[in-house]
Image (tube, rainbow, N blue to C red):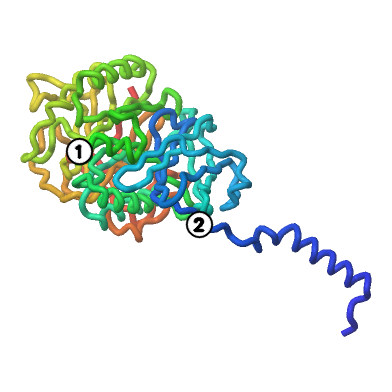
Amino acid sequence: MKPPSLPLRSLALTTLVLFATTLLPEAQAEPPKASKTDKYRLIWTTKPTNRVTIGWNQKEGKPGTVHFGETDHGRNAEAYPETQAATHTKKFDGLHNCFAKIENLKPDTRYYLVISDEFGTSSRFQFLTAPEEAVPFTFIAGGDSRNFRDVRISANQIVAKLRPLFVAFTGDMINKDTPEEWDEWLDDWQHTTGEDGHLMPIVAHRGNHENRPKSIPAYFNTPSDAYYSFSVGGSLFRYLVLNSEIPAGDKQGKWLDEQLEKHSSSAVHLVVGYHKPMRPHVSKKSEGTNPFLWAGKFYEHGVDLAIESDSHVMKRTLPLKPSDSGHEGFIAVENDPKSTVYIGEGCWGAPLRSNDDNKPWTLDSGSFNGFDWIQVSEDKIEIKTVIVENPSRVGVIDPQAPFKDPEGLALWEAKGGTVLTIEAD
Ligand SMILES: [Fe+2]
């Protein structure tokens, strides 16, 4: 075959050079070296529509900087339009916890990020801010992950597949609150990160096994007493994180009163989460005298759902009203817009206990590892309880149908139906 003429050859060469200079540089460039960071956390405390905190452990050297923006630039830190240096750092238990609080984000917006330090650049992560509009969303609530890492990891892997908007973790992450346990727990939490780098927001609550009051603030940069609140979807949803390990009254009680006064008339759904149950469904557990002080306030202000933990069983109650004439201080009420449904009681890998203390107002209880998977929309809250098993067989959620059971997901067929519905009132 005759070779192409000179002008044609030069055209081909020019095209090749142009292709190489426009398309190949990024692909051919050396990938950046790795940063010395690990144990990533995306933390929600207040105002998650506009504000998140990125937490990590700086293994060596000075705290890195978060590079972020709405466009995915992979691991090319310099290409991201925004940066945020660590706003708070805390050496605790031998870890160098770094927190970058990022403000002024857009609601319901996906952001991409890397952390760069003097050594290099982290993997590329991404996260989603909470919506300001009253659109339906899902979240997961559960706690008590303190002993068995295999179960804990399985639960975390299922969380990644269900991809809720956030996880309300209701305490007792660890058992003896030791550095070794936190080191493992934070590594295991990485299983909640999606294969695409999606970071799962955690809303951290304090349990009795976080027996050092400083642990939760040190690892999750929460307020020092670990009670706080936030809204999702404007007035659609208000969530209050309470701390059952400090007095329910006093400063916390006053704060709770103010919060309920402020939000109960406007919020469509008022939801609270805390560790110690008021009335455990395990007989050997003592009654929750301290959190029970909140029951009257919940009823008075029409709190719709209370999420509890600690007992290592799962339970759902009927809608309840506190009453001196009731069983253990509660009676079941129907069609009372002020009533509260109580769910929980936590098992994400802690030793399972026997659910041997049902009440006349218990809807159902069970002894298995699980968490509650909850969808919030304008007209109702729907709750499914996921049984933690076979994470590899669980399919990934369809983002267009975020509350449709993926293939292989095991759900608790509780009395009253798999889905527990609380209608908006
Ligand atoms: Fe506990």
Residue tagged 2: 34
Determine the image quadrant of residue 392: bottom left
Q: What is the three-letter code of the residue carrying label 1?
A: Asn
Q: Is residue 113 above or below residue 304?
A: below
Mark 2 to mark 1 CA distance (whole Å): 35 Å
Q: In the shown orientation, is residue 236 left or right of residue 390? A: right
Residue 317 figure quarter = top left
Asked whether mark 1 and ligand 1 are closer than 8 Å, the reply comes as no
Query: In this view of the protein, which residue sits in the foreground, 406 or 28?
Result: 28
Quarter of the image for the N terminus: give it.
Answer: bottom right
Which residue is at 76% across, 60% downward?
21
**Does any portion of residue 166 appear in the rendered image?**
no
Q: Which mark is residue 385?
A: none
Report the residue at 51% width, 35% height from top. Answer: 108
**Left or right of residue 54: residue 305:** left
Q: Position of residue 252 (x, y in %)?
A: 25, 22
Judge: label 2 CB < 8 Å from ligand 1.
no
Check disc 1 and report the residue beneath it.
211
Describe the element under mark 2 as helix, strand or loop: loop
Q: Quadrant of ligand 1?
A: top left
Side (left or right) of 183 relative to 117? left
The earlier-in-sequence mark between 2 and 1 is 2
**Which image quadrant: the C terminus?**
top left
SS category of the residue bearing label 1: loop
Give percent across and percent down for residue 219.
Answer: 33, 41
Q: Is residue 103 visible?
A: yes
